[in-house]
Image (tube, rainbow, N blue to C red):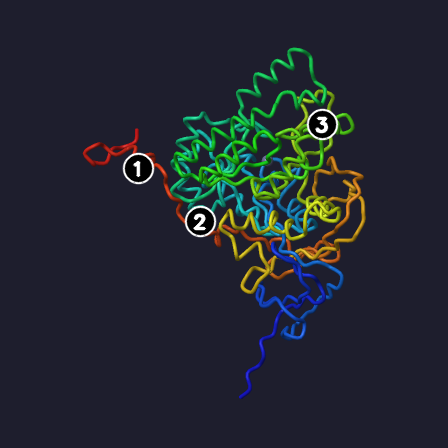
Amino acid sequence: MKETPMKADLVIHGGTVVTDASAFPASVAVKDGRVLSVGAREAMPEAAETLDATGLHVLPGAIDVHVHFREPGYTHKEDFGTGTAAAAFGGVTTVFDMPNVIPPTGTAEALAMKHKLASEKAHVDYGLYGLLGEDTIAHVPDLVAGGVIGFKLYMGNTFGNTPSPSTGGMLEAFEVVAPTGKRVSLHAETASIMARREARLRAAGRKDPLAHLAARPAVVAVEAVARAAILSEWTGCRIHVLHISSAEELRPLREAKARGVDVTGETCPQYLLLGAEDYGRLGGVIRVNPPVREARNQAPLWAALMDGTIDMIATDHAPHIPDEKVRDDIFTVDCGFPGVETQMPLMLTEVAAGRMSISDYVGWTAVAPAKCWGLYPRKGVLQPGADADIAIVDLGHHWAIDDRKLQSRAKITPWHGRAVTGLPVHTLVRGRFVMKDRTLVESARGWGRSVHTIQEMPKPELRNPDSTMTAIVQKPDGASGVAA
Ligand SMILES: [Zn+2]
């Protein structure tokens, strides 16, 4: 009896496959949601469906570790349906959603509710962050058991006014999370500095857009990154510095990495491409935390990506509706704007301009996030066995961003009218088209799944084992004490 040859579900022909090391012409066969093979056209199996990607580049879909899809609680701004549709149009195949919603994702019940909402509506895969605050430390085991991808800790206030833990609370939080291996993502701005600055500015009558930048000088991030790194080093808790915005905070980050602290970092397109001179033109639209800073910060941030000090690009997709963004008093404007759909075109424009290679881009948006959260090599790379999460892009397509055409419910960004080069044409998640020929595949709503089930975070080396919570509550004679 002759064996029937393996048949693929889909073969993508004619494109250029991109890894973090190279770009080469190859076909990609997909079966049962995974990459079956990558290679010469004549080596591909028969397929139920073929896609001609001649002239296009075939990238591992981007993994955006920092989005706010606002559900539950703020669905007039966004929900899992509109947010993940925006991701699909942006070539983003996995997102990590933040916990500053109503109720905050700080209990097992709130997490279970969010898992349900996301699984019903998501077009792309997702991870959910648990909130790590002064009063949710006790919930860490339940949140881990309930399937968080990691934790979010707000050292500084931002939208939702989640209270910032004290340094003592933060140390204890790190002590509890450390043995789980999960990574704690930090909004690294020190609240008490900002509160005093903002009060002084308001008392002086400042409410112009640049007052927002004045309220959050880079020292808020320098102090926060340095302090978090010290606590991470003490406890062995893995940390991630969100939205790096200044040249100055790169120094404590570099020093921590040199000491062997397991700290990773991200920056976002707004810090690489916008500057203080844009406040006049954009007004409240540009208000985001941390603030877009003086243009002199851009070159050091790019250099930090190139030398690995900053590991990845995320977006801090933080939608608000126009009424919440256009106000006379900058301190009353909601902070943030959508970004998950525009990240890839904005960054591919920089590839086209020769600032970095397409492989650098794949390293920063797919490989690094997958590795830092234990998803590699199931995600972040196109090789046999990996999830077929694919962004097929036209690197030569010139167009202009139009806020009105974005999938996000919040149709207001600082990028409106900006000329870009590079466009995602098709997006696949686990082998299924979620966006095809710039059209949303409606039937893929609810296809997205939580990635915590494939996450592997090996236990970290605890550098100071006496600092674990178990050790702290032990009595000297070895008899177990009881935490009050
Ligand atoms: Zn954020």
User: Alpha carbon of mark 1 to alpha carbon of mark 2: how far?
Assistant: 21 Å
Residue 203, x across and y down, in percent: 64, 11
Which is more N-terminal, label 3 or label 2?
Answer: 3
Residue 37, x across and y down, in percent: 59, 68
Q: Is residue 88 left or right of residue 135?
A: right
Residue 105, x across and y down, in percent: 51, 38
Give me the disc on residue 470. Answer: 1
Q: Is residue 456 left or right of residue 22?
A: left
- Secondary structure at badge 3 equals helix
Q: Quadrant of ligand 1?
A: top right
User: Alpha carbon of mark 2 to alpha carbon of mark 3: how far?
Assistant: 39 Å
Q: Amino acid at mark 3?
A: Ala
Q: Amino acid at mark 2?
A: Met
Residue at the (47%, 27%) spot, across then down: 165
Q: Is residue 155 left or right of residue 12?
A: left
Query: Looking at the image, do the residues carrying marks 2 and 3 touch, with CB atoms under 8 Å apart?
Result: no
- Secondary structure at badge 2 equals loop
- Neighbourhood count class around disc 3 (C-alpha, 10 Å): few under 14, some 14–19, many 20 upward: some
Q: Amino acid at mark 1?
A: Thr
Which is more N-terminal, label 1 or label 3?
Answer: 3
- Secondary structure at badge 1 equals helix
Q: Nearer the viewer, mark 2 or mark 3?
A: 3
Given residues 73 and 152, the one toward you in this image is: 152
User: Alpha carbon of mark 3 to alpha carbon of mark 1: how far?
Assistant: 48 Å
Residue located beneath label 2 in the image: 457
